[in-house]
């Protein structure tokens, strides 16, 4: 197997931006980046307050800086990982690319399609690796699903169904004491024009497109708030057309009481369908018409290559969200190493989500907003 | 408990129309009608061919007739059960009501809303019991779900999701040898204006409305065929508004390869949600926000009265489709007995689907067709 | 398909003994016997009190008698179904066989192996059909499991695991008000020498032997009571040897709080294993080593003949305990019809449990008691 | 919360022994040790061949040594983690303790009870932390189960059931090309007197005792090989008595084709039971008699403190084996830090398995061997 990282022969130096004390996603990014020994987090900007930023970094064992500009000027980095509130992604990514660095950025990539497209172009022009952490695409059984669809196991595709259901906004949280996180989430200037779509909608859209191999071409949106009096979106249901006229549906909400980060994806083809659900991430259901339903398991002997390479522990030993997230970092490291030392990357390592995927997410959001504005009409992306 | 059937003191005499040799649903109707000893099937019209009709009835042990008119003239019946192709329901129901009989009719009630409404009015004017066999509403745990929603366990409702997925039409069956059943199904003049909606769509719509207690007020439809070249509908996805502005989605298809009559219903309220799925009909999931998920089981000690009365076998002994179907017949028998002998019926026995529910199904179908005709616009029912 | 019942050309006349008002199993027997239109229940002895016996029968629509002797003398029966307390089975079965009738008897067949063997011999000598209602063996997917094992799908067998867990005796019910049923259950002179083994142990043992095709040859028992101070057995755990040295385990209890009639069977062979669990009776798990796990469903196109013939409703429409119970009655009817009219029975109809199986159950119980008496030593059957 | 690690103010220096290239468990140990930033792996002995040992360590980024003695002499370590073949644990642990170091050792602790007890005494005399990696006890929902049992949620305990089923030895692997790992596993002088019990049996026994809070007091064993001609044990089934007379069963096997590291534990009490299964490690089933079954989830708001403190990621984001393993390392680090700096450790951090647990595992194995030698008699531990 080609492996540019081995050719490089050293860990990549990573600077982190955001994810300070109390952040859920910051701890995930840092653990994921380091799990496979391909990144050293050497520096970070963990707060917009310089003093707190330095203290937080020191507590985590790396150098702290008071600003991104300061870090970029001072540190010999290979890459930057950005996990700040959504409205800061654009300028921070711009700066990192301008400094010649590779980038890992949390989703949504930006708050507008124009910004996302600009980053995509900048990254391509600079020939820099740009990974957007749609982490669910890092699960081995999602890679297996994508590979099976691509291999034609299901035959011609007919329909795609995806849902992503959460409960965190099911209470009228805006009327209570606001956490720091909730404060910027509720400010659409910061979190973006549709909270639910920025938070989880682009995850669902990316997952459906990633596995089916098909972009969304048009949609009809029912977008709004389930909680009475709420001014941000907490619910979106969609009728979809993917490339080739494949039908689809998507439902996302953060206000469905009693759910728990429940993602389910089904892809239907002429011969059968696959189904994956987050709570059972180590398994993939394959139902071929006229045959018994099959439960493929991470670790099965005959998984396809794109899945098999990501299996870390023997069958029957559950893996979880951390490993999925780390798979994106590991592959991004391979792509970065290839760029740095000119070696050919492992071709199977190139399936991580990129700025182009980030831009597709923003295109989806803007089409959804346009559909709502048009009274629920079908809108092309 | 009031029980008009006990007051009546005899079985009801039932004539069956349709469901001849080879019919799946005919055998179900007959077994369901007789399971509780409340109906005697004394006569039937099992074929449009008089000779075959009489032979088929004789083989089943009751008197056969060559036509509905003949049977109605000759037999001292209390009720008629109709399970013929959809286009015959209207005139057969009319005739039975005109003869003063109570009616059990398979779904869809008719092929037009006008006909369905006419039957509803005729039944009401004649003060006759009219049961439409939306059999899924007969499951005890569906009754539990409805009762819990009505009791406010979930708080104010926020969203309803229903899906009904089948695989029987996933192959291009219209290009092979056609069975008798498939021949009339594929003829929209007989099966109605939208095959998938007539076959299973009204089941899904009824179930969602039955459990939520809310009618559908408007919809936006994506209705058509998944199988290339197919002229009848095999797929429908819907964005919904129920009464009170409650949002919803519904997906039904007969062309999703690898599925097996998979019905799933979820109702979300401010405090939590319930989920029921056909493959686990003896259970109901209740997820209250901040509490562990609960799996209610048919036979649990503290089920609500509308569910508890339908439990036939002790907890842990599975019941199935037959018992659900029979529950409708049993309750229809109670209502018929009450009408016949003037006794008060058990009030809990009156939740079976009626001609009004049948008409609501046709209203749904016609709104779906109107939405399609309008390019996917929202249409009020 | 050969079908002796069709040759017979009439329903079989069945007399029922036991199962009076309030009995759970009586209602099941009567519904199961009649579900397929092969038996008419024409008479019964529903109580040991003659007046109540006649009233109960009348309420159910058949002739009542004050005693078995009276019924056998007065009624032109083909068969008798016995569902009385365990200690009455022996003399009632004897009488029915002596009257030349076929017999269906609930389990355990008797309270001693000697009695069970005597009935087996009497039935064989009289050439009468004798069905013991180990109803779980009537589930289509249990028949599929048995057929797959017999066909060698698993290769040479290696281990069998069975458990049957209930909760009904988890509270110290003997210290409260006793129901009629509980009164005779707690009297070992009536219910037999080991309550848990008579009630459910022989079901588990029969199921394991039925599917594996192997008799139990020796056992090591841990038999007793989980509830402090209880004088009857409510728990048994067993190490087993089946024929050919196949290892096994069995656990049964009626005092495991929170369970619900939970039966799980696994059969392991050199190539893989099967697993069936009561709560999902319509499915069977097949796990072949190195292959994805398969979930076979009742109604699948390629089930083996012994299972396929018992499928009543299309895939995805759940069947339950009633249909399993009725399958035994249907097959017993076929065997009875063959004896009555001399026609060849459908060979696939002959898998119902017989007096020999009933005797095997008693042999198991007596070996378990012997093992306990010997301090938990291994004992041969 | 007291936190001795914070008082210590630096990472612990860890030397690893074993787990060279190709080792499954070596990679797990190293990732688990470092996941929480409490250990730096600074040195290791990764092979018994000095040159290969140094090369392997260099490839992983820490100093390599040719022997344990060399490493102990050269390195300023706080602790040693041992993951060599079983027969080397004893002398390596002795050496580490003699050098004044804390120890993490894989299971089984040793190959004899005498050795295990000696290590236990040595560790206690030296006042050194000694963690045995029964990793399944690190799952948050296992901690929840233990805490609920201890809190009396189930009432007085009545029965415990545990099983651990694998398939890796279901083929006659001893007749093929042997891997390095398989070679020492098949040599009982190295792997211990009962392969299945050393590999997985002590995991199952520990889990049952850990959650129930009860030691095994006596057992009756059915121990041997399922695969014909095999000379090592691949199967063990046990009847158990825990302290207080609580009944139990345990089944472990490495030769059950089609299984996948399937661990299931049930603990029954007078009020209900709990069930945990490895494939759904993020959930715990609680079934209280007369109440709906509850599915507790990792991340639920009201988990008990011993579970809650181990939850790393929000509800609905699956965790897996790695995090469970890391939980043991994290808690061992807390205990080590407390010893090093004299601070009070977090009392909730002290539930990791110790040398005493390792010795209990060996006592179980030796009792099982004694039971077999006595023809399956009950033997006290």
Image (cartoon, coloured by chain):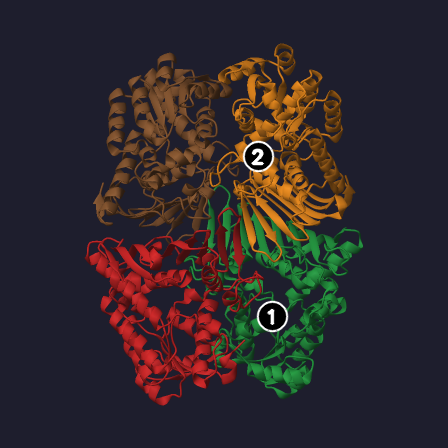
Chain colours: A green, B orange, C brown, D red
Q: Which mark is residue B309?
A: 2
Identify which residue is drawn at 60% across, 70% down: A24
Mark 1 — on which chain does it sit?
A
Q: Compute the Cα span from label 2 to label 1.
A: 48 Å
Identify which residue is drawn at 59% across, 58% down: A260
Mark 2 — on which chain does it sit?
B
Q: Badge 1: how crowded within 10 Å, few (<14), some, or many (20+)?
A: few
Q: Can residue C151 be seen at all in this image of the molecule?
A: no
x and y percent of residue C9 in the render?
A: 42, 15
Nearest the eye: A369 or A25: A25
Residue extending farthest left:
D374
Q: Which mark is residue B154?
A: none
Residue extending farthest right:
A374
Q: Which mark is residue A24?
A: 1
- In this rendering, position of residue B346 left or right of residue C155: right
Query: Quadrant where the N terminus of chain B lies?
Result: top right
Query: Quadrant where the C terminus of chain B lies?
Result: top right
Q: Secondary structure at mark 2?
A: loop
């Amino acid at each position: 197997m080609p492996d540019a990282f081995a050719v490089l022969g050293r860990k990549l130096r990573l600077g982190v931006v955001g994810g300070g004390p109390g952040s859920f996603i910051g701890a995930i990014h840092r653990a994921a980046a380091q799990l496979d020994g391909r990144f050293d987090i050497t520096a970070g900007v963990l707060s917009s307050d310089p003093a707190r930023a330095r203290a937080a970094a020191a507590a985590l064992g790396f150098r702290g800086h008071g600003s991104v500009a300061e870090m970029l000027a001072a540190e010999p980095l290979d890459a930057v990982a950005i996990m700040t509130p959504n409205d800061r992604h654009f300028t921070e990514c711009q700066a990192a690319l301008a400094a010649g660095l590779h980038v890992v950025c949390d989703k949504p990539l930006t708050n507008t399609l124009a910004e996302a497209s600009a980053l995509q172009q900048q990254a391509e022009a600079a020939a820099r690796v740009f990974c957007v952490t749609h982490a669910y695409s890092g699960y081995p059984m999602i890679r297996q699903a994508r590979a099976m669809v691509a291999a034609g196991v299901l035959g011609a595709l007919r329909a795609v169904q995806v849902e992503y259901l959460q409960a965190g906004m099911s209470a009228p949280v805006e009327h209570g004491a606001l956490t720091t996180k909730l404060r910027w989430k509720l400010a659409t200037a910061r979190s973006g024009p549709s909270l639910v779509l920025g938070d989880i909608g682009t995850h669902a859209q990316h997952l459906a497109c990633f596995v089916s191999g098909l972009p969304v071409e048009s949609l009809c949106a029912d977008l709004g708030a389930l909680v009475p009096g709420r001014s941000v979106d907490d619910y979106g249901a969609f009728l979809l057309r993917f490339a080739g006229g494949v039908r689809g549906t998507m439902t996302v909400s953060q206000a469905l009481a009693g759910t728990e980060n429940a993602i389910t994806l089904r892809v239907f083809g002429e011969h059968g369908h696959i189904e994956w659900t987050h709570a059972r991430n180590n398994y993939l259901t394959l139902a071929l018409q006229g045959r018994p339903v099959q439960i493929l398991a991470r670790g099965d002997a005959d998984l396809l290559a794109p899945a098999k390479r990501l299996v870390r522990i023997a069958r029957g030993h559950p893996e979880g969200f951390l490993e999925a997230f780390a798979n994106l970092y590991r592959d991004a490291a391979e792509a970065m190493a290839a760029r740095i030392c000119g070696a050919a990357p492992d071709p199977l390592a190139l399936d991580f989500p990129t700025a182009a995927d980030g831009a597709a997410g923003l295109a989806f959001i803007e089409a959804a907003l346009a559909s709502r504005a048009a009274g629920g009409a079908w809108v092309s992306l």
